[in-house]
């Protein structure tokens, strides 16, 4: 496995872990999400709002499915992996950025997935291997 694929694999697993926590909150398996300090961070509110739904479905489980596909592509060394991580990053930026622009609040757990997407994208698009 190329080193870029290893980095992208670890980053994708990190995103999956964050999305698993978000999904647990969205399915009421968790009563509260631990949060970063500061009034701007409102993970509980944002992950349970109507804005956290896509086509009527919670975005956490949808993200789990999407990032599971990413993990499969990356772990198999697929040439499609670099495009999939790019799509993951664009989606994460649009969701987190849109929420911030609309409500001036952020979900710390969502930012973990966003950061992990950025790492995956940088690893695969910046790789010369």
Image: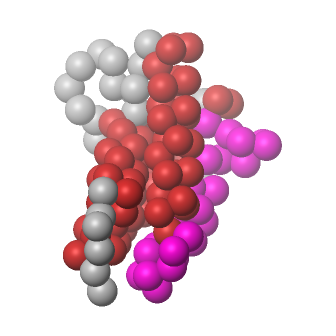
Quarter assignment of residue 108: top left
Residue positioned 38% across, 57% down in the render = 125
Q: Tell me if I can see residue 45 in this picture.
A: no
What quarter of the picture does the N terminus occupy?
bottom left
On the image, the x and y values in percent for residue 129 come to: 29, 74
Q: Main secondary structure of the magenta part?
A: helix
Camera-side residue of 48 and 113: 113
Name above or below for residue 62 compared with residue 38.
Answer: below
The residue under the point 64% across, 29% down is 51
Q: Who's the residue at 28% across and 80% down the image? A: 2
Q: Quadrant of residue 110?
A: top left
Q: Position of residue 84 (x, y in %)?
A: 54, 61
Q: Residue furthest right?
A: 55
The image shows residue 71 at horizontal and vertical percentages of 46, 73
**Is residue 78 a member of the stretch shown in magenta?**
yes
| Magenta region includes residue 69 | yes
Measured along the vertical axis of the image, is residue 125 above or below residue 114? below
Coordinates of residue 29 in the picture (x, y in percent) = 50, 56
Residue at image position (68%, 39%) is 53
Magenta stretch?
Answer: 52-80
Coloring applied to the structure: secondary structure
Q: Is residue 82 visible?
A: yes
Residue 66 is left or right of residue 128, and the answer is right
103 lies left or right of 41: right
Count the marks: how many?
Answer: 0
């Amino acid at each position: 496995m190329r080193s870029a694929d290893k980095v992208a694999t670890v980053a994708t697993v990190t995103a999956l872990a964050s999305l698993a926590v978000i999904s647990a909150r969205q399915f009421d398996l968790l009563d509260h999400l631990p949060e970063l300090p500061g009034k701007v961070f409102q993970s509980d509110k944002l992950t349970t709002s109507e804005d956290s739904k896509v086509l009527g479905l919670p975005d956490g489980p949808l993200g789990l499915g999407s990032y599971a596909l990413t993990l499969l592509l990356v772990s198999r060394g697929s040439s499609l992996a670099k495009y999939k991580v790019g799509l993951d990053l664009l989606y994460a930026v649009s969701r987190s950025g849109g929420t911030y622009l609309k409500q001036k609040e952020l979900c710390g757990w969502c930012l973990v997935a966003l950061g992990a997407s950025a790492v995956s994208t940088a690893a695969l698009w910046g790789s010369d291997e």
